[in-house]
Amino acid sequence: MERKELNELMDFAVEFGARLMTSGGEIWRTDDLLHLIFHAYGIEEPDIFMLPHTLMISVQPKDQEPVMRHKTVGDILVNMEQLTQLNRLAWEIRDNHIPVSTLKEKLHAISIHPPYPRPMIICGMAIALLSLNYFIGGGVMGGVLVAIGIAIAMGTQMYMHEIFPVNHLLLCGISSFLAGSVIMIGYKTGLHSNPYLLMIINCIGLIPGIPLINACREMLNGRVLSGGLLFMTAFLETLAVACGFYLSLVIFGGVL
C-alpha cells in the first residue's frame, strides 16, 4: 500500500472507531472491527490502544516510518441506527475491496443523528414509563407526574449542552433534580401520596443502562481496565442521578 493510501486509511480508521464508540459500541467490538478493516487491506498487525475516551492506532509499514493516529472520544450518545450501519460498513469493506479513497465518503454518508427526532424519543420513554407505572399501581396522577418528570429530565439532557457546556455528571444531577422536583410538587399539592415510587420509576429512564451493560461485557471479554473505567463512569452517572433526586427530597421536605 502506498503511503498516501495508508494515511487515508488511518484517517478513516480513527474516525470510524471514535464514532463506533460514541454511538454505544463496546471497546472489544471496536477493536475487532478495526482489525477486520485493516486485514481487508493487507495490514495484519495494527497496534490499537483504546480506553473509554481515547483511541490510538499505529501501523509499521515495512522499511518505512510508522504511521500513528490519536483521537479523543467524546461521551456516549447511544445511537443504535448509526452503530448498525457502522457494523455493516466494516463487513462491506471486508467482503468487497473498496478503494481507500472512497472510505471517508462512505463514512460521512452515515448520519450521526438518531433516526427519530428527539421529541419522539422523549415521548417513547414517557410511554414506556407510563406502562411501568400502570403495572406497579402508580395511578393516573402518578403516570402524569412520571411523564412530565421524564420529559423535563430528558429534555434537559438533550438540549442543555447546546445552550452552554455542562459537565455530564452535573447534567445528570440537574435533570434528575428537576424530575424529582416535579414529583415532590405533586406530592405536596396532594396529587400523589407516594413520591418515592415515582422517583424509582423515573430513575429507570435516567440511569445509563447501555454503558453499564458494556462495562460488564468488557470485563467478561477480559478487558478489565477498560471495563472498570466504563463501570466507574456509569456508576458515577447513576450516583449523580440519585443525588439529584435526593436533593429534591431535601428541598421539598421529603423523608427517607
Image (cartoon, grey):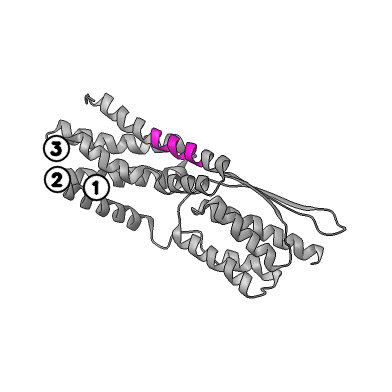
Q: Which residue lies at the image location 73% right of the left edge and 57% below the top edge?
A: 45
For disc 2, the neighbor class at 10 Å (few under 14, some 14 to 19, many from 20) is: few
Q: Earlier in the sequence, mark 3 or mark 2?
A: 2
Q: Which residue is mark 3?
A: 192
What x and y, as percent, mark residue 127?
25, 54
So how many labels did they put on this image? 3
The residue stretch that appears in magenta: 230-239
Instruction: Answer above or below: position of 80 versus 224.
Output: below
Residue at the extreme bottom of the image, as rendered: 96
The type of residue carrying mark 2 is Gly
What x and y, as percent, mark residue 32?
60, 58
The type of residue carrying mark 3 is His
Query: How much space separates mark 1 and mark 3, taking CA atoms?
Result: 14 Å
Secondary structure beneath disc 2?
A: loop
Q: Which mark is residue 147?
A: 1
What x and y, as percent, mark residue 90?
59, 66
- Looking at the image, which is closer to me, 91 or 10? 91
What x and y, as percent, mark residue 19?
56, 55
For disc 1, the neighbor class at 10 Å (few under 14, some 14 to 19, many from 20) is: many
The type of residue carrying mark 1 is Ala
Residue at the extreme right of the image, as rendered: 63
Q: Quadrant of residue 212?
A: top left
